[in-house]
Image: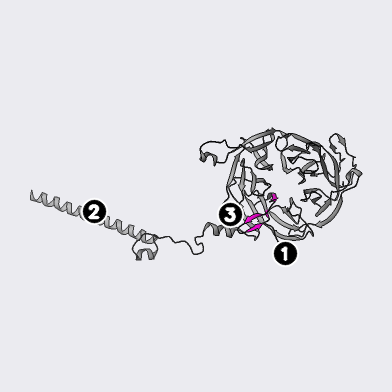
């Protein structure tokens, strides 16, 4: 019996020793594996809670500092943010205090520009009907009314948004809340299924005009329509009868409408305006046609209403297509930019009723070249309200020229991260900190709108 107990105890002790030997060998192997993976310095020091430090090359910066670092040009004043897609058009109100933008995200935004140097801007958001994408905007009468050109699958449309006057109530909190704009009038298929390229509005003050806002819309076809801003009534319809329109605009006083359009190399050119056939310009095969810009006159009746759109002029002289044009602030000159590498300033204050032709006042060579020295063309052109500075664009490049000499005053080689789609000068100076500044706004495919100061007329 005692022998059995002794053998049992001995077996237990031997089993325990074998188990201890197995576990000791396992932990020694595990420790060697950890040592082979971990760096030596990690084994020499006790394990502590890791700490993370930001590298010295990227110090913490204030948002204002980041914004300042992004400004790569001294004339860059500010950036209007909040757009969800490409910005396709913009327009200042007549007092320069509001800036409307058309964005491909389906929203029109109206920014309040109390100070161009502000860190943030309040804006009114206008959501277009479902499926509509705004392409251009124009203020009507004042900053409380806005006409929007949009494109949908069914075609182009025009919407006029106006603010309803708040009803008088006893609640002062409701009176201080700004009313949302409502659609006052609309036109579907304004240019059938063709897209609206440009929409320009101005207050008609020429002759017997009654001071109402008139609008000129240009399609990507060949038609241009004139509208009454307040009522939406169609006032006139003209056709360039060229290959396709590039843009159209109306003079600041509401007297003229001018269009830049593409032409074919060999083509018979006809123009119709209020039922009258213009003289035909016939081009023989193998010859290049003379490139010209068409100009119409808006004729007003004694009661101030638009009577007709007629009396076309032709600005002949460019050797290639006109890409963009604009009127001078006094409505007596037209500035054209062409693919032939020149800018021309025309005097249209002539007696065209007596067959007096418009005169070329100045011709400038475009002072913008690529890396090979080839002259580049301008995509957009706009003149400052004082008539002294031309703002021009090519792709993402923004340039300022002297309207007197054609000299380049300044250039922003990469004004935006995408192509510039539209530009506009504020009609009046805007507060910029403790100073007043002549401000240019640019819209781009990069989802941004930028504000720029005008350069000095005599660069050092």
- Residue 220 appears left or right of 315: left
Q: Is residue 433 magenta?
A: yes
> Foreground residue, 415 or 121?
121
Residue beneath label 2, please?
A: 19
- Looking at the image, can residue 407 be seen? yes
Residue neighbourhood size for the residue with mark 3, other residues' Cα within 10 Å, grouped as few (<14), some (14–19), many (≥20): some
What distance separates the C-alpha of mark 1 from that of mark 3?
A: 27 Å
Q: In this view, does 36 lie above or below 229?
A: below
- Residue 58 appears left or right of 343: left
Q: Which of disc 3 and disc 2 is earlier in sequence?
A: 2
Q: Residue furthest left?
A: 1
Quadrant (top left/top right/bottom left/bottom right) for the C terminus: bottom right
- Residue 142 in the image: state x and y as whole percent: 67, 43
Residue beneath label 3, please?
A: 118
Task: Check disc 1 and report its element: helix, strand or loop.
Answer: loop
Which mark lies nearer to you, 1 or 3?
3
Image point (29%, 57%), residue name: 25
Which mark lies nearer to you, 2 or 3?
3
Picture quadrant of residue 135:
top right
- Residue 421 in the image: state x and y as whole percent: 69, 48
Q: Which of disc 1 and disc 2 is earlier in sequence?
A: 2
Which mark lies nearer to you, 2 or 1?
1
Residue neighbourhood size for the residue with mark 2, other residues' Cα within 10 Å, grouped as few (<14), some (14–19), many (≥20): few
Q: In this view, does 131 lie above or below 360?
A: above
User: Which residues make up the magenta segment?
Assistant: 423-439
Residue beneath label 1, please?
A: 459
- Residue 415 in the image: state x and y as whole percent: 66, 55
């Amino acid at each position: 019996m005692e022998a059995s107990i002794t053998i049992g105890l001995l077996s237990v002790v031997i089993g325990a020793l074998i188990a201890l030997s197995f576990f000791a060998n396992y932990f020694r192997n595990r420790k060697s594996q950890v040592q082979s993976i971990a760096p030596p310095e990690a084994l020499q020091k006790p394990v502590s809670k890791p700490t993370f430090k930001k590298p010295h090359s990227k110090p913490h910066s204030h948002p204002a500092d980041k914004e300042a670092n992004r400004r790569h040009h001294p004339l860059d004043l500010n950036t209007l943010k909040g757009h969800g897609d490409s910005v396709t058009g913009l327009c200042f109100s007549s007092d320069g205090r509001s800036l409307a933008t058309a964005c491909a995200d389906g929203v029109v935004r109206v920014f309040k520009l109390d100070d161009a140097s502000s860190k943030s801007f309040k804006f009114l958001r206008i959501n277009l009907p479902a499926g509509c994408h705004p392409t251009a905007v124009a203020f009507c009468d004042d900053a409380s009314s806005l006409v929007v050109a949009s494109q949908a699958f069914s075609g182009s449309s025009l919407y006029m948004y106006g603010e309803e006057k708040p009803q008088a109530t006893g609640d002062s909190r409701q009176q201080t809340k700004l009313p949302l704009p409502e659609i006052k009038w609309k036109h579907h298929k304004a240019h059938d299924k063709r897209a609206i390229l440009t929409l320009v509005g101005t207050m008609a003050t020429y002759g017997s005009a009654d001071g109402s806002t008139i609008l000129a819309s240009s399609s990507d076809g060949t038609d241009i329509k004139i509208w009454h801003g307040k009522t939406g009534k169609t006032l006139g319809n003209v056709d360039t009868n060229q290959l396709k329109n590039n843009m159209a605009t109306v003079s600041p006083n509401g007297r003229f409408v001018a269009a830049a359009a593409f032409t074919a190399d060999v083509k018979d050119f006809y123009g119709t305006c209020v039922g009258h056939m213009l003289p035909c310009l016939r081009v023989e095969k193998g010859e290049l046609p003379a490139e010209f810009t068409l100009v119409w006159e808006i004729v007003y009746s004694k009661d101030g209403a638009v009577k007709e759109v007629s009396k076309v002029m032709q600005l002949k002289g460019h050797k290639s297509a006109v890409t963009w044009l604009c009127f001078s602030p006094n409505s007596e000159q037209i500035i054209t930019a062409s693919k032939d590498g020149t800018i021309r300033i025309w005097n249209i204050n002539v007696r065209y009723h007596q067959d007096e032709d418009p005169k070329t006042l100045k011709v400038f060579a475009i002072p913008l070249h690529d890396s090979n020295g080839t002259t580049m063309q301008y995509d957009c052109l706009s003149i400052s309200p004082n008539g002294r500075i031309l703002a021009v664009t090519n792709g993402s490049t923004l340039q300022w020229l002297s309207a007197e000499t054609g000299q380049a005053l300044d250039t922003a080689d990469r004004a935006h991260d995408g192509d510039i789609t539209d530009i506009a000068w504020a009609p009046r100076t805007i507060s910029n900190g403790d100073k007043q500044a002549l401000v240019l706004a640019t819209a781009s495919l990069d989802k941004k709108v930028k504000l720029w100061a005008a350069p000095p007329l005599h660069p050092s």
